[in-house]
Structure formats: structure tokens, C-alpha cells
Amino acid sequence: MNPSLLLTLPLLLPLYGAVLCLLFWQRNQAQAVIAATVQLGLSISAGLLLYEVSQTGILTTQIGKWPAPFGITLVSDLFSALILVSASIVGIAVFLFSLQGLDSKRKKYGYYPLLLFLQMGVSGVCLTGDIFNLYVWFEVLLICCFALLALGGTKAQLEGTLKYVTINIFASGILLTGVGVVYSLYGSLNIAELALIVRQPDHPNLQLLTLCSVFFLTGFGIKSAIFPLFFWLPASYHTPPIAISAFIAGLISKIGIYTLIRLFTLVFIPKANFMLPMLLLLSALTMVIGVIGAAAQKDFRKILSFHIISQIGYMLMGLAIYTPLALAGSIYFIIHNILVKTNLFLVSGVVAQQHHTFSLKKLGGIYLKQPFLALLFLLSALALAGIPPLSGFWGKFMLAMGGFKAGNYGIVATSLCVSLVTLFSMTKIWNEVFWKAKPLKVSKPSGAIPAKSRYPKFLYMPVIFLMVFILLISLYAQPFINLAQQAANQLLYTNSYIEAVLKR
Amino acid sequence: MKTIILSTAIRLLTPVFLLFSVYILLRGHNHPGGGFIGGLIGSIAFVFHVLAHGANATARVFFSLTLYHHPRQSGHSRTRYFMQIMNANIRGRRKGRNMENRWNYIFVRVRPVYLIAFGLLLAVASGTIGLLAGQPFMSAFWLDVHLPVLGSLGTPLLFDAGVYLLVMGMVLKMIFTMSKE
């Protein structure tokens, strides 16, 4: 197929869908039909893109026929295609959940168009080949997140959104400063051309590259909740309804890590004496802090939110070790985590649908009433903790192998200990929510509870749907690991990327 | 803020603002200007109107339309029926004719959201034309005609018009929401 069509479809489909949803502003049914069509089309086009990229190599298109360093470039290598495919799968699941699991008031105030705009932002971040456009797409994505988090306007939601907005606007300021500094020092914002420039050994401003990279590390680090500035994430992700928080929690912080990996392999080559040890330290601290925070929580979604932080540490670990195997581990882990984390959030939504609370104290006895749901949760939780046949194991295995081969024993030991504590947290949820007897006292509902639905069984659909994909990448892992390894090779041996963008 | 000076001035200035905004939109391709700033200037007219008369009045005057109709009587030809409807909808709008009493009517309201959506649709569609022709997204296509006021016609003009509507819809949405408080 025509590469320009393949590369623009993941942007155009959600955009057209969102515009149509706006035109049918007061008809929720029509919006749902449009969104369903778009989600299906988006996943098909993302799948085609992945197929084409894995067959023919990196695809590029120049928007408006302006040649590469001057115009806007859209690029897709294996890494971005893989993220796009998993994002579209998660999009389908969250859409299915929202059909029964979201109240009609929020649907009326534009849930579907916002979700589609958000997906457009995600596709844009994955496909762009230009740092300034990367920043702009990230803003598109964040503004949709702000609106979605505040949608409905309950008190808790507004409080969470305020924290989210404040810290993210601060991070965007740092990022924009970084973009300006890079442009003034190197005279280009096209990622491929920058990659060429910073590999010239006699460039006068080469010493300042680490300085620039710190701007981006801080900016995207805040947005993906890396160690020192992570506190906004558990403060805001548990407030909105599950149909919103599952998508944001499952996907958005991983997009920050995606951009970090993209930039730190292509442009800001990390120095072995400063940047790599710092990344190692940050990833270790992120893992440990996240998991300790989770151990102290007593709310289903708050535990899951803290675990996002600890898993961000694993993804950063692959970047910090900086070998092809470790990066492949990171890529596989990102895909695994997008699917599994969304699924766990959806399970918590199904539980809250019936029992009207997320608090571990008030829940209980679900194993007896809904054994199938308990099984679905157990599989996802074990996958998250990394128990052998399931997907988390393969990611952690590759990361640990990479760490051992590179001689970074400290980080491997940390990651393995953190895995154990993750297992402890998951067991805590299992014991409290599914295993123990239901507490006798019936309590009042609290927080943002999903809407009552006519077909409660329908909520199992998205969970089962995601579970199929989790089992696929767990039990049939070899092709996906191969893909991840190819993607890591494309990232580390940058010539193919630079040639694909500049030589057309 | 209902003063007679302001409301009189607004009545005179509204067409000026709108004309000037279209001028800015059209010169935008080769000179300073374009859809974004044109949309902002055009929305000034409505902002002032809201200040002088309130949001409800603005929505009633500029963004709503009452369409009159009635069922065709037996013995009237289709042409005659059509002329009657046209007559009612054009000449019937003059003051003093109480059309509402004798005719059925539909109340059409243009919400700012529709302006936003239509603007976005126009802008994206102008880019998609290139894609359909087998070239990269947003490739420009120009017609060979050169009109005296409009300048050259092409897909970038369509894009700018989309941005114009989008910006105008955005400002209107904000103004209408804020003036409700």
C-alpha cells in the first residue's frame, strides 16, 4: 500500500471520527457507532502498518511534499508501529467497556470525541519525525487527558485534575525550553537530521548535548512519572471513572517512556560516565518507590496506580542498560504493560460495578460469586508480577539477561526484589477482594462509581478481549520477542532511520 | 452593559469587522493574515454584540433561523407550493407579520460546536484531497483561475477557511459559556 496513506490513516481516522462525533453532538447512539467504526478501522490500519514496516523496513512520508529537514515528516519504524497496534487494541477494549460502564451524563458531554482526539494524539506522538511536532502532539494528548480527567466534574476528579494539570504544564514548559535550546544550538528540529548533526565529532556545540538531554529527561520524566516527580500520578489516576482512567493509566505514561527511548537512542546518545548511571539510578529508585507506595495503599485503583510507577522503572531500566537485548526487553515490557495494566483497571471497574466501592476493606467474597472474574484477575495479576508462562516474565527475563550481560548486577537484583513485592501487592488484592469473606456491614458507595448498566455481563467482554491478547503474547511469545529485538536493533543502529527520512 | 451608544456603534461596526476578517483570511496566503487571525477578528463582532445585547440575543440574531412551512394543499402545483414557501421564508421575515400564528415552523440553531466541527472537517478534507490523489497528505492543488478579489483558488484556501470557522466557533463557545455566569 501507499506509505503516505498507511502513515496518515492512524491520524486521520480518529480525527474524522471525532469531527463526526462533534457534528452529532446530542446523539450518543450515533457517536457510539462512529467511535466503534473508527476503533475498528484504527486497529486494522495499525496492523497493516506493522505488517508493512516489518516487511519493507522504515516507512516515511513528507507532509505536503516539503522535503525532509524543512517540512514535517511522518516516520514509522517497528517500535512505533508496535506501540500503535497495542494502543489501538486498548482503545477497542476501553470503548467496549464504556458502552455499559460509563454514565450517560459523561457520554453526553463529549466522552467519545475526546477519546478519539486522545488516540489521534497518541498516533501523532508515535509517528512524528520532528521534535517540535512531538511536543505539539504531546500537548494534544495532554489536553484531551485534562478534559477527560475532569469530565463529569465531581469534587475528587477536579482535585486530581488540578494536580495533573499543574505538574504537566510545568513539564511542558521545560520541554518547550529544551526544544528551543536544541534548535538554537544545532539549527534543526528534524530528528533524523539532528541524529546526523550530533554524530559529527567536530561540531562546536557537541559538549552541550547532555545539557539539552536533561531538559527532555526532566520534561518527559515528569510526564511518565519517573522517580523524583511521580506523586501526581497516584493522586489523579484513581479519581475518574474506569472507562477513562483505564485508558489513561494503561497508555499515557508509557507514551512518555516511548519518547524518552526514541530521543535517547537517536539524538541524545547517553554518555557512559554521566547519563547512563543516572538513568540506572532513576530507574531503580522509580521501581522501589512505586512498589513501596503500593504496599501502603488500601484502595484497588490506588495500588494499581502505584504499580504503574514501579513498572515505569522497568521500562527505563532497558534504556539505562543500553544494549539491544535490554532495549528489546523494554519494548516487550511496554507492550505487555499497556495490555495488562489496562486489563487490571477494567477488572477493578467490573468489581466496582457490582459492589459500588474500590476500598479493599469493604470488598470481599468475589471468588465465590464470580469465579470467572477472579480467574481473569488472577491471570492479569500474575502476568504483571512476572510468573513464568505469562507475559511479564518474558519482559523481565530479557531485562535481567541484558543486565547480567552488561554487568549491571545491582539493577537486576533490585528489579527481582521489586518483582517479589509486586507479587505481594497482587496477592494482597487477591486476598482482600476475592478470597476473604464479604464484610457484613453494607456501606455507602463512595467515589466515582461506574454507571448502573442493563447488561452487567457485557462488561466482561473487554476484559476477555484483552486477556486473549495477553495470553497470545505470553504463550506464543517468540514472534513478539523477535519483533521487539528487531525494533531494538533499528533503534540502536540509527543509519536505517536516518537514510529512510533524509534520502527520499 | 446596555447603552445606546454601544449598541448603535455595534450595529454599524459588525459588518465592518466581518468584512475585514474575510479580507484578512483571503490575503493570508502570501501576506500577514490567514485563517486564525481572520477568525479572531471576525469573532470580535460577535463578542461586542454579546457585550451590548447579551448572549441570548446574539444567538437569536446570528445563529438561529426560523423556517416556515405548511403542508401542500390539494389543487396547488409543486411550483406554486415552492414559491409560497420561498415567499414566506423571505418576505415573511419582515416585522409585523405574525407568521408563527398561521404557519408551522422549525427552529434551526447553529451551535458553536457545529462551527468547530465543520471547520475541522473542511481543514482535514483539504488535506485529504492530496492523499486521494496518491500524493502525501496535505499536498497543495491549485486551480489555474485567478479571481480579482479571492486570488488563486486551491486547497490551502480551503484549509484556511476551515481554520477560520474553527477559531470563530471556539471563541463563540467561550463567550457564550462565560456570559452565562
Image (cartoon, coloured by chain):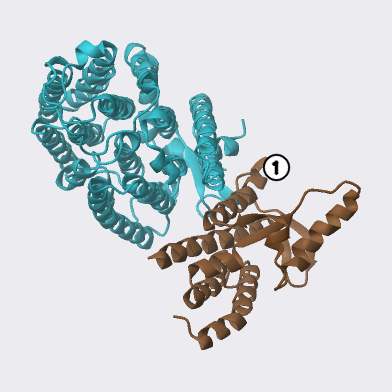
Could you tell whether A37 is left or right of A287 in the image?
right
**In-front residue for pair A397/A444:** A444
A147 in relation to A205, above or below: above
Give how far across and how far down residue B171 sits, in percent: 48, 64
- Residue at x 53%, y 34% (from the top left corner): A38
- Residue at x 53%, y 33% (from the top left corner): A33
Q: Which chain is brown?
A: B
Give how far across and how far down residue A202 sits, in percent: 34, 54
Give how far across and how far down residue A182 sits, in percent: 34, 57
Give how far across and how far down residue A283 sits, in percent: 17, 37
Does the rendering let one see residue B157? no
Instruction: Assess disc 1: are there few (<14), some (14-19) or many (≥20) residues with their C-alpha within 10 Å of its C-alpha.
Output: few
Could you tell whether A352 is left or right of A107 in the image?
left
What quarter of the picture does the N terminus of chain A occupy? Answer: top right
Name the chain under label 1.
Answer: B
B32 in relation to A428, above or below: below
- Residue at x 12%, y 18% (from the top left corner): A431
**In-front residue for pair B154/A284:** B154
Q: Which chain is cyan?
A: A
- Secondary element at image label 1: loop
Could you tell whether A467 is left or right of B15 in the image?
left
